[in-house]
Image (tube, rainbow, N blue to C red):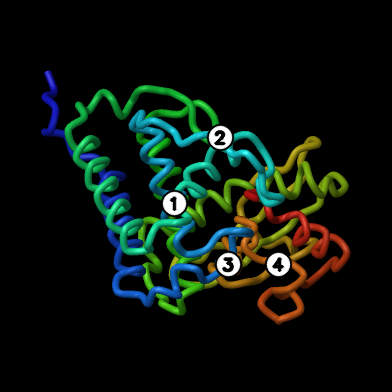
Amino acid sequence: MTWAGTHHEPVVDHLAEVWGSVAAACDGIRSAQWDVATDCPGWTVRDQLSHLIGIERLIMGDEAPPPLEVVPDHVRNGFAELNEAWVAARRGLPGPDVLAEFVSITRRRLDELRDLPAERFDVVGWSPVGEVPYRDFLVTRVLDSWAHEQDVRRALGRPGGRNGPGEQSVLDRCESAMPFVVGKRVAPPEGTTVLFVVTGVLGRRLLVSVDGGRAVVTIDGDREPDATLAMDQETFWRIGFGRVDPSRVLAAGQVRIDGDLAVGHRVLAAMPFMV
């Protein structure tokens, strides 16, 4: 029998690392910096932390704030509306108070996770990517938290938190979405191959081929791809997570397209899958 508190799950350590880095990014910032806009439409630095607080409190069963009376334009679905209610409830609070709540709630959450028995992490349930074991659901919390950490760091001009488990999970999520982007959104002719060349410490080469009417990842062999898109890992995830307009990074020279330019441009435009 496995007793609570004796089992070690690496994903819990990954959450602790990312949440600690989020708190460090905001530690000691000036009062006005809490209201700096971030890459997420409608959200400031304060709002980013409020969002992370709300998600974890929701997971733990805490009472949700009242529904929004007016839904902002950047809120596009019911789940986002629920998220926005947690954010809106904290807009009148001083930034340090929101940071203190974030630190408190994430410590509480980590204590809860470290006390779970091993079998709890195998239980299949809902996640943003479908029905998965609980440990995989927690990976979605790692990647979401890290992406919002980077939103905060970019807004504040405080780089950090790179090339760890958070960024790894985000890049893996982007990689897993590229067959959908190519096969469903672009839907090029049968046999079309698209190569993504992602540079950086956590970079990768990803060859997606249209085979039998669907796109699949194949071995990056000797055949010349029909279109190649090259970019660094930060550009790759920021496009995929909807943090930057693809045309903007192309104009800035942060993406290079070779081969069939028409296909390459269509793939680039279709890459934002998480908005």
Image mark for residue 198: 3
First in sequence, mark 2 or 4: give its number. Answer: 2
Q: What's under tag 1, amino acid-wise?
A: Arg
First in sequence, mark 4 or 1: give its number. Answer: 1
Image mark for residue 229: 4
Relative height, residue 186 to residue 97 (above, below): above
Q: Where's residue 145, x and y in %?
A: 42, 53
- Give the left or right position of residue 125, taking residue 101 as reference: right
Q: What's under tag 3, amino acid-wise?
A: Val
Q: Which residue is mark 1?
A: 90
Relative height, residue 168 to residue 69 (above, below): below
SS for tag 2? loop
Q: Residues within 10 Å of mark 4 (few under 14, many from 20)?
A: many
Q: Residues within 10 Å of mark 3 (few under 14, many from 20)?
A: many
Residue at horizontal 37 percent and vertical 67 percent from the top: 161
Q: Where's residue 166, x and y in %?
A: 40, 56
Cα distance in 3D space between marks 2 and 3: 41 Å
Relative to the observer, which residue lies in front, 44 or 262?
A: 44
Residue at horizontal 63 percent and vertical 71 percent from the top: 231
SS for tag 1? loop
Q: Which residue is mark 2?
A: 67
First in sequence, mark 2 or 1: give its number. Answer: 2
SS for tag 4? strand
